[in-house]
Image (tube, rainbow, N blue to C red):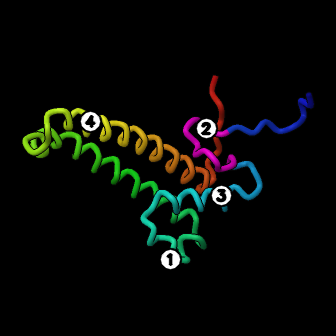
Amino acid sequence: MNDSAPHRTTPPGWPQGVPGPEAPGWQEAAVGWLLDQCPPDYRGYDAWRRHPLALAWIAARHVEGEVSVMREAYRHARVELGPHLPPEALPEILGVLEREGLRLRATARAAALVHAAFTGEHFVPRL
């Protein structure tokens, strides 16, 4: 093992499939991942590809908005949907909302990490 080789790590929560910010070409992979987190119409704006920091900024906000919507939906589902669904449906719907909320929280963390990397922040592993 060569101890002089650089040790590349990514912070916990870094998006899967995107090389770490020390890897060559990571920005292109990150742009693709960020666009996947945004509405499809965002791909039609060349400015997002030309300015990946701006894309990371808006993608992080977009995903945080989705987290907020999911929390709101979870809070109101029982009252607003409960009377209109069969009894077995509400727990199922609440479970889906909970799982989607967890997925979105992880995506929001990943988007924030990519944004931080585009601003030049460096991840320092902690013991």
Q: Are marks 4 and 1 in contact (CB under 8 Å)?
A: no
Give the CA distance from mark 2 to mark 4.
33 Å
- Per the image, label 1 sits on a secondary structure element best described as helix
Q: Which residue matches tag 4?
A: 92
Q: Which mark is residue 44?
A: 1
Q: Is residue 6 above or below residue 40?
A: above
Left-right relation of 10 to 106: right
Q: Position of residue 71 (x, y in %)?
A: 27, 43
Amino acid type at circle 2 is Pro
Mark nearer the viewer, 4 or 1: 4
Q: Report the span colored magenta.
A: 10-20
User: Which callout, 1 or 3, points at the residue further toward the start of the chain?
Assistant: 3
Q: Tell me which amino acid carries mark 3.
A: Ala
Instruction: Check the picture and name the quadrant holding the C terminus.
Output: top right
Residue 27 appears left or right of 81: right
Residue 108 versus residue 54 in the image, above or below: above
Query: Distance from label 1 to label 3 (Cα)?
Result: 17 Å
